[in-house]
């Protein structure tokens, strides 16, 4: 069984209007949220073999807040994940090494959200994670899928959504 985690970068800062979108960092709330999400991911049993991360500064900072991982996964910053649509993210995943069973993708909306909805598919059984995912995909949110198909066959309806949580769900963020 394979595991795929789709995580949206945490909340970014708009404080410096001179920065390009690609260079925008996390804001303080985003840094705190990313650290809190690390604990939630570990509690959910996430231990990635590979981390595929957008090359945007806010995505890289989100990834850094999740470190360290057990087993020291391969971390691959990718320009192709920057603001990528769902189909482009899917192409990246289809090229993944079949020997790697747990992939973590840290990227952007709307592509990440669209991909998550595609993986769930129209015939997904009603569940709390599916209902929550269908509402929105806020900054810092993570969707965890079980995937039975090989990575190269990933597509619509190929994932079973087992968890969907957001920073606002975590007790650390209520402080």
Image (cartoon, rainbow, N blue to C red):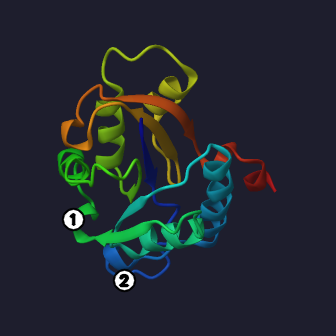
Q: Give the structural element (helix, strand or loop) at label 1.
A: helix
* Nearest-to-viewer mark from 2 and 1: 1
Q: Residues within 10 Å of mark 2 (few under 14, many from 20)?
A: few
Left or right, residue 108 beside residue 162: left
What is the x, y in percent for residue 84?
Answer: 24, 56
* Relative height, residue 72 to residue 158 (above, below): below
Q: Is residue 44 visible?
A: yes
What is the x, y in percent for residue 66?
Answer: 58, 65
Residue at mark 2: 19
* Relative height, residue 164 to residue 75 (above, below): above
Residue positioned most to the front: 99
Q: Is residue 110 visible?
A: no
Residue positioned most to the bottom: 18
The residue that appears at 39% across and 17% down in the rendered structure is 124
Residue at mark 1: 80
- Mark with earlier residue (2, 1): 2
Looking at this view, is 140 or 2 the one in front? Answer: 2
| The quarter of the displayed image where residue 151 is located | top left
Left or right, residue 152 beside residue 147: left
């Amino acid at each position: 069984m394979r595991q795929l985690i789709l995580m949206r970068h945490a909340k970014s800062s708009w404080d410096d209007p001179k920065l390009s979108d690609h260079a925008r960092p996390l804001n303080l709330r985003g840094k705190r949220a990313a650290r809190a999400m690390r604990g939630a991911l570990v509690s959910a049993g996430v231990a990635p073999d590979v981390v595929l991360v957008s090359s945007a500064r806010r995505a890289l900072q989100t990834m850094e807040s999740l470190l360290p991982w057990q087993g020291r996964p391969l971390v691959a910053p990718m320009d192709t994940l920057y603001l990528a649509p769902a189909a482009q993210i899917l192409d990246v995943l289809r090229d993944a090494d079949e020997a790697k069973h747990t992939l973590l993708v840290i990227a952007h909306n709307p592509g990440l959200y669209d991909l998550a909805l595609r993986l769930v598919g129209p015939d997904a059984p009603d569940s709390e994670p599916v209902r929550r995912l269908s509402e929105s995909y806020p900054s810092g949110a993570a969707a965890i899928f079980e995937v039975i198909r090989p990575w190269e066959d990933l597509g619509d309806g190929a994932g079973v959504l087992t968890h969907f949580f957001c920073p606002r769900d975590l007790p650390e963020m209520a402080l």
